[in-house]
Image (cartoon, helix red, strand yellow):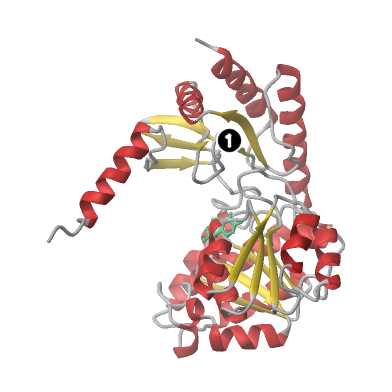
Amino acid sequence: MSRPQLLARLALACEQRARDALLRRVRTISAVDGSHVVVAGRRLQNFASNDYLGLAGHAQLVEALIDAARQWGVGASAAHLLGGHRDEHAQLESELAEWTGRERALLFSTGYMANLGVIQTLLDPRALCVQDKLNHVCLIDGARLSGARLKRYVHADVDSARRQLQSDPEAAALLASDGVFSMDGDIAPLRELASLCREQQTTLMIDDAHGLGVLGHNGAGSVVEAGLDADDVPVLMATLGKALGVAGAFVAGSASLIDGLVQFARTQVYTTAMPPALAAATRVALRIARDETWRREKLARLVAQFRHGAAQRGIPLAASRTPIQPVLIGDSATALDVSARLETAGFLVPAIRPPTVPEHSARLRVTFSAAHEEADIERLLAALSSAMTGP
Ligand SMILES: Cc1ncc(COP(=O)(O)O)c(C=O)c1O
């Protein structure tokens, strides 16, 4: 018998990744101070975080977390259906529903679990799941888990999406798209997708992980910015660990969607509820994100300043107006090298390589936060331009 050995096979796959300059490496942050982090004893300015509104370290969130932990303890101690659902969760769910203009909302412990749970609930092997090629991996994995026929369309190409839907006009169908694409920063053609879904009697699901808090009136997200409502986008998902600075996620929609998820979403039913103290901190984050418009305005100014400066210096950027600003490089080894040079210059800017992005499209993923200042952007631009041209 010569059965392949799993651990040896895994080690070989890692070695291959290293040879291809694709090995991933965990960096341990030993301290955080505003938009700075300490890594390996060095203080770096952080341009790698999704804390777009600068809320992750906000004193009011920290206080809310501590107060709620004193009241509720640390863990929720059970799944939502089995005694883990506390007042803080219930209140947060109604506030999220109200903010996003939906009837109800349901909390999940992570965005990954929310997408797995909702897609697996809605689809079965006879159904069609049509997705943008650049969708986040957890939307793709949700379709795989459901057993539905997964058909991917050319990025942001509504005609390509239509062709995929028309491949089986009789099947129940879900079209799922990121609202803001996580590695590209561009926004899906939401109005066109909504009208395609109406025409094709298809349910539209938007993952607004990177749009909530950042786009739209009161930060209600990319769907609101596009002028769409709950009829256009019946399934809305967003995360709490990015602009809201906490952790977790929710799905918002009609009462019947949420009732169905409570019954069938396995990643919600069979898991411990998020700690109630996190729900309490998120409620404060939601209020600040909704009311403190200056954070969104400042963020937009910083993004515009960066794009203007990059154009002047010939730094190639993707077409994005969100706080996700990819610097296009192509080759993985070069992207790693530029990222290392930036680190030497005092900036944390990760290189994103395949398989997270398509082959030959390695990039630096620069992200901005309302915690950054104009002078930070100027310093980053100067460092970027010398890191990309230097010997
Ligand atoms: C578009 C998108 N959806 C979902 C997720 C997953 O969310 P979470 O980190 O809460 O699991 C992410 C990133 O993490 C994301 O970028």
Residue 154 in sight in this render: yes
Q: Regarding mark 1 in the picture, which secondary structure is present there?
A: loop
Q: Position of residue 324 (x, y in %)?
A: 65, 42
* Residue drawn at the location 52% of the way across and 62% of the way down: 247
Q: Nearer the viewer, residue 167 or 387?
A: 167
Q: Give the quarter of the image for residue 91.
A: bottom right
Image vertical order of residue 335 relative to residue 118, above or below: above
Q: Is mark 1 within 8 Å of ligand 1?
A: no
Q: Position of residue 201 (x, y in %)?
A: 80, 76
* Residue drawn at the location 47% of the way across and 77% of the way down: 273
Quadrant where the N terminus is found in the figure: bottom left
Task: Identify the residue position indicated by label 1 in the image.
Answer: 361
Image vertical order of residue 57 relative to residue 110, above or below: above
Q: Nearer the viewer, residue 140 or 370?
A: 140
* Residue drawn at the location 46% of the way across and 83% of the way down: 84
Instruction: List the single residue furthest toward the front.
Output: 1
Q: Position of residue 283 (x, y in %)?
A: 62, 68
Q: Position of residue 188 (x, y in %)?
A: 75, 53
Image vertical order of residue 321 relative to residue 107, above or below: above
Residue 220 in sight in this render: no
